[in-house]
């Protein structure tokens, strides 16, 4: 990525450049740890975090499918906001620690790096 004539400026461009070159997104962790340029490291970390939170939210939404009366778009919004609030809160609660633990375990297993909440 450091040898590109045009560097990605956002997640969409990063994904495009990686897919265009046949680089799997699981290598984002390696990019985040070995890249020389801080803006590329930060972009990789943001994408790793976003992908991991997406997995968590998708798992949470799967429980809505089991609702006997179905679910509304309002239920989906509440679910997404709940997870984002729990993960990104500065308040130390057992529920937020548990979700952050899930996210960090997922990041460690999928991308091979460890992210600490206080660096984000």
Image (cartoon, helix red, strand yellow):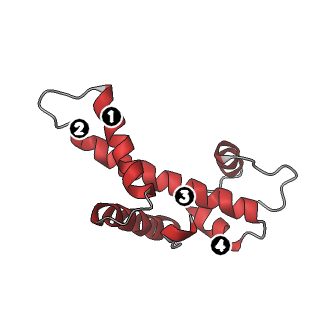
Res 24 visible: no
In the picture of the structure, the residue carrying the numbered disc 1 is 76
In the picture of the structure, the residue carrying the numbered disc 3 is 48
Picture layout, residue 66 above or below residue 102? above
Residue 114 falls left or right of residue 94: right
In the picture of the structure, the residue carrying the numbered disc 2 is 64
In primary-sequence order, the first of circles 3 and 2 is 3
Residue 120 falls left or right of residue 82: right
- Measuring from the top left, give residue 34's x and y in whole percent: 70, 73
Instruction: Give the Cα separation between the discs numbered 4 and 1.
Output: 35 Å
Q: How many marks?
A: 4
Would you identify the image quadrant in which residue 106 lies? bottom left
117 vs 11, nearest the viewer: 117
**Circles 1, 3 touching at the beta carbon (< 8 Å):** no
In primary-sequence order, the first of circles 2 and 4 is 4
Instruction: Give the Cα separation between the discs numbered 4 and 3.
Output: 12 Å
In primary-sequence order, the first of circles 4 and 1 is 4
In the picture of the structure, the residue carrying the numbered disc 4 is 33
Give SS at disc 4.
Answer: helix
Front of the two marks 1 and 3? 1
97 vs 72, nearest the viewer: 97
In primary-sequence order, the first of circles 4 and 3 is 4
- Measuring from the top left, give residue 107's x and y in whole percent: 47, 65
**Circles 3, 2 touching at the beta carbon (< 8 Å):** no
């Amino acid at each position: 990525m450091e040898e590109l004539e045009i560097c990605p400026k956002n997640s969409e461009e990063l994904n495009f450049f990686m897919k265009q070159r046949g680089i799997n997104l699981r290598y984002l962790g390696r990019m985040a740890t070995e890249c020389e340029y801080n803006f590329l490291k930060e972009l990789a970390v943001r994408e790793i975090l976003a992908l991991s939170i997406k997995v968590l939210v998708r798992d949470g939404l799967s429980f809505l499918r089991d609702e006997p009366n179905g679910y509304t778009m309002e239920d989906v919004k509440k679910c997404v906001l709940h997870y984002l609030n729990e993960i990104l809160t500065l308040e130390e609660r057992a529920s937020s620690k548990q979700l952050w633990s899930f996210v960090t375990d997922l990041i460690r297993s999928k991308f091979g790096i460890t992210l600490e909440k206080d660096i984000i």
